[in-house]
Image (cartoon, rainbow, N blue to C red):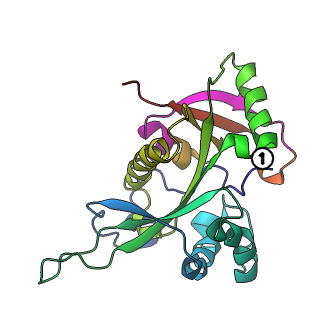
Amino acid sequence: MRPRRNEGGSVAVDGASPGARTGVNPGPLPPELSFRPLKRSDLPLLAEWLRRPHVAQWWRESSDLPAVEAAYGPIIDGSDPTEGFIAVGQGPEQEDGQQGEGHSLAFLQLYRLDDNPEWQRAIAVALAEGDLEVIGPSAGIDYLIGDRTMTGRGLGRTMIAAFVDLVWDRYPDTSAVIVAVDQGNEASWRALEGAGFLRAWAGVLSSEDPSDEGPSYLYVTRRPVG
C-alpha cells in the first residue's frame, strides 16, 4: 500500500481572499521557504492541523495524537521509506543580522512509487487508459497547508514547485512526479497546474484504499532536460 495521503493537498484557491472569507488578516507571504525533516516534536502541531476544517475536508484521517504518532512515527524513525517535511517560512531579521525562527506553514511528504507497488500499479493502469506511459522511476507527493492564513494566496503553487526541485535532488534517478487529486479539490489541482504539472488522466482509480474513492485526476510533471 502507498502512504496515507490527502486527496491532493489542502490549499485554498490561489487568488481568493481568505481574509474576506474568514475575517483573518493574512499578512504577507514569507519571502523564502525551506523544508526540514519532520520531527517527533512536530506531531502535536500536525495533529492540530489535521483537525482544522480546511485540512480535514481532504486529508481524511484521524487527528487524534496517538493515531498521528502511529501513522507518522515510522516516517520519522525511518522504518517507512516515505519522507516527511515541514515547510518553514523565513523568520524576520533580528538586530544582530541573524534570521529569526521561521514559521511552520505546511506538511509535505514524498515517496518513490516503487516503494508502494499496489499504488504504482493503480497509477500505471490509469495512465495506460490515457495512452501515457512514464518511463523510469517516479515519485509521488502529498501536501497540506496547516496555516489557514496562508491559503488562497499563491503559496500552494510556490511550495509545490520548490518541493518538486527537492524531489529531483533527493531522487536523482526519478523521471517524473505524479500526484493524484480529488476532482472536487479545485484549489489543489489549480496549485499543481500553477507549479507546472499537467493533467494526465481523469477517472476512478483502481484502488482498494478508501481514500481513493470517487473521481480523481492524475497530474504529472517530468524532470527537466539538461
Instruction: Examine the rendered structure and indicate whether residue 58 appears above or below residue 166.
Output: below
Q: Is residue 201 magenta?
A: yes
| Residue at screen point 41% across, 29% down | 224
Is there any visible trace of residue 70 in the rendered image? Answer: yes
User: Would you say 194 lies left or right of 129 here?
Assistant: left
Q: Picture coordinates of residue 121 (x, y %)?
A: 79, 34
**Total labels drawn:** 1
Is there any visible trace of residue 63 in the rendered image? Answer: no
Q: Picture coordinates of residue 63 (x, y %)?
A: 70, 75
Occupied quadrant, residue 82: bottom right
| Residue at screen point 34% across, 72% down | 25
| Quadrant of the snapshot with the C terminus | top left
| Residue named by callout 1 | 212
| Residue at screen point 60% across, 64% down | 55
Q: Amino acid at mark 1?
A: Asp
Identify which residue, 220 or 145, lies in the foreground.
Answer: 220
Instruction: Examine the rendered structure and indicate whether residue 168 appears above or below residue 144.
Output: above
Q: Which residues are magenta?
A: 190-207
| Residue at screen point 54% across, 69% down | 38
Q: Secondary structure at mark 1?
A: helix
Q: Is residue 13 magenta?
A: no
Mark 1 surroundings: few (<14), some (14-19) or many (≥20) residues within 10 A: some
Identify which residue, 87 or 51, lies in the foreground.
Answer: 87
Q: Picture coordinates of residue 17 (x, y %)?
A: 38, 59
The furthest residue to the right: 208
Q: Picture coordinates of residue 124 (x, y %)?
A: 74, 29
User: Would you say 28 lies left or right of 78 here?
Assistant: left
Occupied quadrant, residue 219: top right
Instruction: Examine the rendered structure and indicate whether residue 126 appears above or below residue 65.
Output: above
